[in-house]
Image: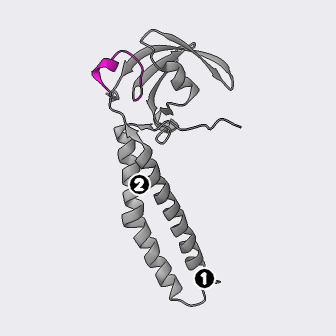
Amino acid sequence: MQPVNKKTNYITRDGWEKLERELRFLWKEERPRVTQAVSEAAAMGDRSENAEYIYGKRRLREIDRRVRFLSKRMDELKVVYPSPQQEGKVFFGAWVELSDEDDNITLYQLVGPDEFELRENKISIDSPLARALLGKQVDDEIRVKTPSGIKNYFISAIYYKKKTVE
C-alpha cells in the first residue's frame, strides 16, 4: 500500500484571511451573479444550444466545488502565530534570507501548502528547501537537493515580520 502524502494543516494568519476572502467572494458575490445570469439565459428558450446557459451552469459547478473544498479545508486548518521563543531560529511563518554560492540573496517565507506562492517568495513548509531550513539559525549552512543538483545556502537573516522595502 502506498503511503498517503498528507498536506500540513498549518496556515499563517494572512493565508487564512486570503482563503476567507475568496470563500466570501465566491459565495456572496460570484455565485449570485452567475445564478442570475443562468436564470436570464434559461429564460431565452432552447437550453441545448444556449452557450450562456451552458457556460453559466459549468461555472456554477466550479464555484460550488471550490466553495465545498474551501469550507472543508478551512475546518482542517490551524492558524499558527509566531511566538517570541522562535526568534533566531527558522520555524513556520518565518521570513528567511538566504545567500547561495554565487552570493545571490533570496528571501522566502515558510507557509502552509494552501498559501504557497512562488511569485511572492512564499514556499510550502512541505518543500525540501523549507524542511532543510526548519530549526536552523543565522549563519547555518544548508544543502538542498534540487532538480539541477545539490545547492548550498547560507542563512543570513531570520525574522517573523516581512521587511519593508525602503
Report whether 65 appears left or right of 21. Answer: right
Q: In the drawing, what numbered circle is on residue 22?
A: 2
100 part of magenta stretch: no
Name the residue carrying label 1: 50
User: Magenta stretch containing residue 88, yes or no?
Assistant: yes
Percent coordinates x, y for residue 87 in the rendering: 33, 18
Q: Is residue 53 above or below residue 126?
A: below
Task: Tell me whether circle 1 and circle 2 mark residues in contact (CB < 8 Å).
Answer: no
Q: Position of residue 94 (x, y in %)?
A: 39, 26
Identify the element where label 2 is drawn: helix
Q: Quadrant of residue 71?
A: bottom left
Residue at (42% x, 20% y) in the render = 90
Residue furthest front in the image = 1
Q: Nearer the viewer, mark 1 or mark 2?
A: 2
Total count of labels: 2
Question: For the point 47% across and 20% down, which residue is it?
Answer: 134
